[in-house]
C-alpha cells in the first residue's frame, strides 16, 4: 500500500450554535498491514483483516493512539468503483463482518467495490474495547415502570453505578467516543486505503454517521446508501421519546397479527385481547418470574424484536404461547439469554451506545424533567417508555463532557440514496423526510406501511433493486417535488406461522445477518 503524506490545516466542525475547532495535524497517512481473517464467514470470502492506528484525540495526534479493526473483501467485477465502508448502527455495533455484504446486493450490483467492514473505536475487535459491567442486564431486575418510590430509587442507583463503572473502565477514552470522532476515524480509514473518495452504506445510527461525514467531508463522498435514517435535528433525548410512541404503535400491529393467527398461538382473537393478555402476564411476572428469572423487565425486552423487525415474529409468538398455554418458560428464557449474554465484555455494545449518545449532545440533568416527560409519554405508549428511559439514564451522570451536535447539511453532498419503511420504530419515518430535505440531491425509497427497521438487502426486490441500480451506475429514483418518498415499494411481508420468519438468504449466513440485526434494546438504533 502506498503511503501518502497528508498535511491538513485546522479543521473547524460546524455544529449547532457555532463551530468547534478540532485542531491541526500534519502526519503520515496511516497504513494497514493486511492479513488473513480468522472469522469463518470472512475467511470463506477470502477477506483480509488488519488494524488502522488512529489518534485517541484528533486534537493531539501525536499523543495516545488506538486501533480500529478493519476487514476487506475485494471487488470481483472488472469495473472497479472504489471502496465501500459499512456501518451497522448502534452506536456500538460491530461492523467487521459487513465487508461480506456485497453478496446480498442483487444482480452483483456491489461487485465493483472493495467492501470495508470495521469495528468503530472501542467496539469489538478494535483496541481498546470498552466494557463496564457484563452482568448489568442480569435476571430479576426491577420492573421498568416506577410504580413505587423503591423501584425508582433502585433504577436511579443502578444506572448511576453503571455510569461510574464506565468512567473507571473508559478513562481518557471516554471523552473521545462522539460521532465526530467516529467520522474522523472514517476519514483515517480512507487515507489508510489510499483513496480520494469513499462510498458508504449505513444502517440505523450508521445513517447519522454518514450524514455527519457528508457534512464535514462532502468532497470525499462518492455514493451513500442510508437506511433507517436518524433525524439529525433530534439527537438524542428527543429521538428516544419519539421511539417510545413508535414502538407502542408497532406492538399493537404485532398484537393484531397474533390475533389473526389465534388458531396457532391461542393468545386472543382480537388485538385488544392479546394486548390485555400481554400486560396481565407482565404484571403476574412481577410477583412470580418465569423460571424464577424472567420478570416484567426481561419479558418486555423479549418483545422488543417484533417492534424492530418482522423477522422473529413467529419465534416470540411461540415463546409467548408456550408460557401462557403450557407454563413452559424455556423459550422465553432462551430468547432473553441469547439477547443478553452475561459473558466477559458482553456489554460492549451498550457501553459504546452510551459513550456516544451521552456525549454527542447535552441531556437533561434534572430527574424531575425525565420523570415528567416519560410519565407523559408512558400514559399514551406504555410498552417501552420506562424501559427506554432507564436504558438511557446513565447519561445523567456520565463522566465525559457532552459536545454539540453537528449541523447536518447535505447541500454539497453528491446524490444519496435514502431507504426507510413507513412505520420504522427505531428511526421514525419523519427522520428520513428530514434528511431528504437537508440533502437536496437525495432520493428516498419507502417500504409503504412496513414496520421493519433498516430493512434493505433483506430480500425486498423493489427496495434492493433500487439499491443495486444506484451502486451499479448511480441511478436514483426521480425526485418528486412533494415532501414524500420518491419511490414507493411494498414492505417486507409479515411472516406466516407455517414458515420461518427469515428468507433463505438470511439463513444461509446467520453470522452476517446477526451483524445487521442488532439485539440492542430499543435505545440502540
Image: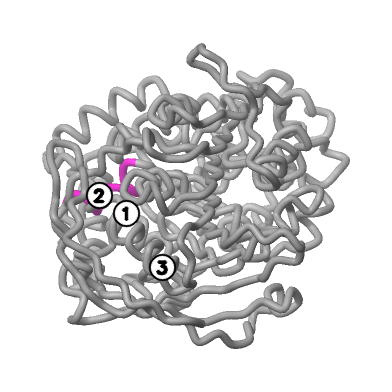
Name the foreground residue: 12 vs 174: 12
Q: Residue at x 71, y 40 (%)?
A: 469
Q: Classify 10 as above or below 414.
A: below
**CA gap, disc 2 and disc 1:** 6 Å
Q: Is residue 321 visible?
A: no
* The quarter of the displayed image where residue 456 is located: top right
Magenta span: 389-396
* Contact flag, marks 2 and 1 (Cβ < 8 Å): yes
Mark 3, secondary structure of its residue? helix
Which residue in the protein does label 3 denote? 348
The x, y position of residue 475, in whole percent, is 66, 36
Mark 1, secondary structure of its residue? helix
Q: Is residue 78 left or right of residue 159?
A: right
Which residue in the protein does label 2 denote? 360
Name the foreground residue: 162 vs 124: 124
The x, y position of residue 238, in whole percent, is 29, 32
Residue 395 drawn in magenta: yes
Q: Classify 444 as above or below 164.
A: above
Amino acid at each position: 500500500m502506498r503511503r501518502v503524506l497528508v498535511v491538513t490545516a485546522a479543521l473547524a466542525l460546524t455544529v449547532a450554535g457555532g463551530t468547534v475547532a478540532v485542531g491541526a495535524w500534519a502526519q503520515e497517512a496511516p497504513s494497514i498491514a493486511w492479513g488473513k481473517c480468522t472469522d469463518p464467514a470472512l475467511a470463506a470470502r477470502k477477506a483480509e483483516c488488519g488494524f488502522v492506528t488512529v489518534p485517541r484525540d484528533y486534537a493531539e495526534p501525536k499523543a495516545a493512539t488506538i486501533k480500529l479493526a478493519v476487514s476487506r473483501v475485494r471487488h470481483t467485477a472488472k469495473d472497479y468503483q472504489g471502496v465501500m465502508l459499512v456501518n451497522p448502527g448502534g452506536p456500538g455495533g460491530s461492523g467487521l463482518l459487513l465487508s461480506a455484504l456485497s453478496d446480498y446486493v442483487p444482480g452483483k450490483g456491489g461487485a465493483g467495490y472493495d467492501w470495508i467492514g470495521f469495528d468503530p473505536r472501542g467496539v469489538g475487535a478494535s483496541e481498546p474495547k470498552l466494557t463496564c459491567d457484563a452482568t448489568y442486564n442480569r435476571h430479576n431486575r426491577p420492573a421498568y415502570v416506577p410504580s413505587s418510590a423503591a423501584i425508582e430509587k433502585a433504577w436511579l442507583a443502578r444506572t448511576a453505578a453503571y455510569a461510574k463503572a464506565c468512567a473507571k473502565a473508559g478513562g481518557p477514552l471516554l471523552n473521545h467516543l462522539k460521532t465526530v470522532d467516529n467520522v474522523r476515524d472514517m476519514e483515517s480509514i480512507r487515507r489508510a486505503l489510499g483513496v480520494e473518495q469513499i462510498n458508504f452504506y449505513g444502517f440505523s445510527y450508521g445513517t447519522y454517521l454518514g450524514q455527519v461525514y457528508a457534512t464535514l467531508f462532502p468532497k470525499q463522498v462518492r455514493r451513500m446508501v442510508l437506511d433507517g435514517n436518524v433525524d439529525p435535528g433530534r439527537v438524542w433525548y428527543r429521538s428516544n421519546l419519539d421511539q417510545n410512541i413508535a414502538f407502542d404503535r408497532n406492538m399493537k400491529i404485532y398484537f393484531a397479527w397474533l390475533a389473526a393467527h389465534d388458531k396457532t398461538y391461542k393468545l386472543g382473537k382480537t388485538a385488544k385481547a392479546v394486548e390485555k393478555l400481554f400486560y396481565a402476564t407482565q404484571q403476574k411476572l412481577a410477583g412470580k418470574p418465569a423460571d424464577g428469572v424472567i420478570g416484567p423487565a426481561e419479558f418486555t425486552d423479549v418483545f422488543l424484536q417484533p417492534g424492530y423487525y418482522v423477522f422473529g415474529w413467529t419465534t416470540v409468538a411461540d415463546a409467548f404461547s408456550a408460557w401462557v398455554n403450557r407454563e413452559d418458560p424455556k423459550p422465553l428464557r432462551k430468547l432473553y439469554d441469547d439477547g443478553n449474554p452475561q459473558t466477559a465484555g458482553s456489554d460492549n455494545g451498550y457501553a459504546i451506545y452510551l459513550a456516544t449518545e451521552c456525549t454527542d449532545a447535552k441531556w437533561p440533568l434534572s430527574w424531575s424533567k425525565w420523570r415528567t416527560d416519560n410519565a407523559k409519554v408512558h400514559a399514551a405508549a406504555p410498552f417501552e417508555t420506562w424501559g427506554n428511559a432507564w436504558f438511557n439514564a446513565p447519561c445523567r451522570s456520565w463522566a465525559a463532557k457532552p459536545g454539540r451536535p453537528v449541523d447536518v447539511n447535505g447541500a454539497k453532498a453528491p446524490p444519496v440514496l435514502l431507504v426507510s419503511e413507513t412505520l420504522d420504530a427505531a428511526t421514525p419515518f419523519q427522520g428520513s423526510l428530514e434528511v431528504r430535505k437537508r440533502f437536496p440531491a437525495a432520493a428516498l425509497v419507502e417500504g409503504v406501511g412496513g414496520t421493519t427497521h433498516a430493512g434493505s438487502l433483506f430480500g425486498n426486490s423493489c427496495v434492493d433493486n433500487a439499491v443495486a441500480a444506484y451502486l451499479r451506475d448511480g441511478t436514483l429514483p426521480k425526485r418528486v417535488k412533494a415532501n414524500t418518498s420518491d419511490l414507493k415499494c411494498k414492505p417486507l411481508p409479515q411472516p406466516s406461522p407455517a414458515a420461518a420468519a427469515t428468507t433463505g438468504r438470511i439463513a444461509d449466513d446467520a453470522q452476517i445477518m446477526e451483524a445487521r440485526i442488532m439485539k440492542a434494546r430499543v435505545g440502540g438504533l
